[in-house]
Image: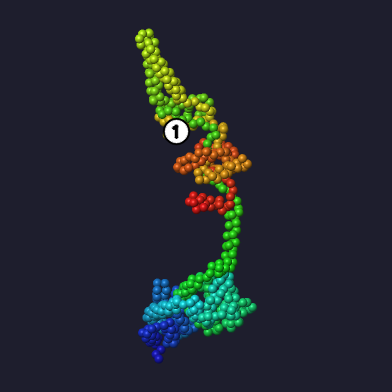
Amino acid sequence: MSDDPWDACTRVIARLETRLKSAPDRALFLRTARELVDHLPAVSAVEMSCPDDPLDQPLCAVGDRPSRAADLRWDAPVTETSALSIQLWLRADSESDATTRGAIDEALPAMGGLLVGAIARIRLDEAEHELEAVSQLSARLFADDQSEARWHRIAVELGSSMRVDRLSLLVRRGQRFQLVGSSVQARFDPRADQVRQTQAVATSIDQQFGTAEHATVTLRGEDGDAIATFLQTGHSDELLATRLGAGQVLVIGEVFDADDRPAADVTTVRRQLFEAAIGEVLRSHHQGYFQRGRDWLSRRSNRWRIAAAAGLLAFLCLYPMTIRVAADGRIVPRTQYTVHAPVTGQIQRMACESGMQVSVGQVLCEFSSHDLDLQTTRLRGEWVAVQEQLQIAATRRGDDSSKDVASDRRVLEARLQGLEKQLSLLQQRQADLVVHSPIAGTVTLVTPDDVGQLQTPRPVHVGDSVIRVINQRDGYRVELDVPDQEIGYVLAAAARQADDPVACRFRIRSEPQRQRHGTLHGLDQVASLDRFGRLVVTASIRPDEQDATFAADAGVVGWIDCNRSAAGFVLCRKVIEQLRLWGWL
């Protein structure tokens, strides 16, 4: 054999090319690494790996690897996230000369390129074999059969994948576990000692998991505990346990010879297949309502839920709460007088202005009406004409037509009296055009102009609000617009007002941080429409104390405390009322 390192590297590459002509496997990397160590005496150790790929980490390691960093290294990308790394350590003697280094530097790219292609082929073959194995496993797991046989088939296949000697499947029934399948036999006696021991130790094993649903736990037990006793009785070295079926199925595998046990072959795809198969069997196994209810109640967490639900139900049914009716409203002076236009015409003169203090009987404003003036003028003209006709009739003396003259005079006199009454009424209406204040107070303009005043002359219609006089010394009250559908609660509370006044609370919108209190004073007997077109009944609230911040027409939000009822009704009152309106309650 030649000692030339170039020839040695060439022989290694040639052997690698020969192996790649057939189907390669993962032993290819180990053989190539050994040939490098055998044909190149200067090489003491070789390691091949894909650092970022957990599937191929490591590929192989040959020789005694020194603690120092690799003398030679070559990397080549395999995928976008992983790369093949070949590391060589040379002996610390004269053999590791520049010629050997040069030969290895030239050979590593060619060797690495072949190995990168080999990784792709090996992965493709493994994926194909895995896909075929998974397809066959799926066909066996989902074959139509009785539930007992399917549990047995699942246990056999799962035991083969986990590399255990005996495997048991237990389904959670409340706080206990029931053995439903075993890899040893399709049918078993649930009264057998081995079955009872397995079910008894399942609770101890389940406590080892904690919150790890998909983990596989290896258990050997401690002296005197249930797991150690179970291992001793079954002559097993260790137990492998995991959960499937969304935590409803506990898998217990028994290993008789732990030293010779091969690695488990439960990949993610296989685990998902087992999960699906177990889920299908669980769904097909229908329990009775009584059994399902007993299993549900046997769980401690469910018992706590029932206790909490019972406590909540007792609170909703027994604890009394006050029915509180909310309504919008405003602040209204207790004593006020509003001037309304008596006629359709115009405001002829204003004798006051906003903020002015007026006394009783003081003139506030004067209205005028062209129609009223025309009617007065027309009636005066008619009155004058009738008066003249009476004077003419009085000058006529007795002749042949004396009887007719007396009859005409009576008609004219009756007409004159009617005209005088009409003139008296018009004069009264004319006098009413001058408005006097019936109370002493402060003037506020109801319909001011843009400049804040009321310029004259200004047209008005009969009934228009023009001026309001407020007596601030008499205090204020609060008016709440109670929705029509909730007025019944307020009426029921008002029925006991003689013994216990109905308490109310309100907040001024401009001062929401302060809450004020009052009592219900009265309710309007007629419902009306608010500015949103909703039916409301006005409730008058008497504040407990007057405040300088009160201002007429200030907006408020109020609450009327009505009678007490069960907390469940108070909290769900809106829903119950709607159901009653629909006729369902």
Whole-percent x and y of residue 110? Answer: 37, 81
**Amino acid marked by disc 1:** Thr
Residue tagged 1: 447
Whole-percent x and y of residue 284? Answer: 48, 72
Taking the image as shown, residue 465 lies to the left or right of residue 488, namely left
The residue lying at 53 percent from left, 80 percent from top is 187
The residue lying at 51 percent from left, 41 percent from top is 537
Q: Of 433 and 421, which appears nearest the observer?
A: 421
Q: Of 54 and 368, which appears nearest the observer?
A: 368
Whole-percent x and y of residue 512? Answer: 53, 44
Q: Is mark 1 on a helix, strand or loop?
A: loop
Determine whether 123 is above or below 469 in the image: below
* Residue 461: quarter of image: top left
Q: Of 224 and 83, which appears nearest the observer?
A: 224
Whether residue 356 appears in this view of the structure is yes
Residue furthest out toward the left: 400
Q: In which quarter of the image is the N terminus?
A: bottom left
Whole-percent x and y of residue 296? Answer: 56, 67
Residue furthest out toward the right: 224
Taking the image as shown, residue 398 lies to the left or right of residue 530, namely left
Determine whether 557 is above or below 129 in the image: above
The residue lying at 41 percent from left, 15 percent from top is 410
* Residue 116: quarter of image: bottom left
Whether residue 86 appears in this view of the structure is no
Crowdedness near tag 1: few (<14), some (14–19) or many (≥20) residues, C-alpha within 10 Å: some
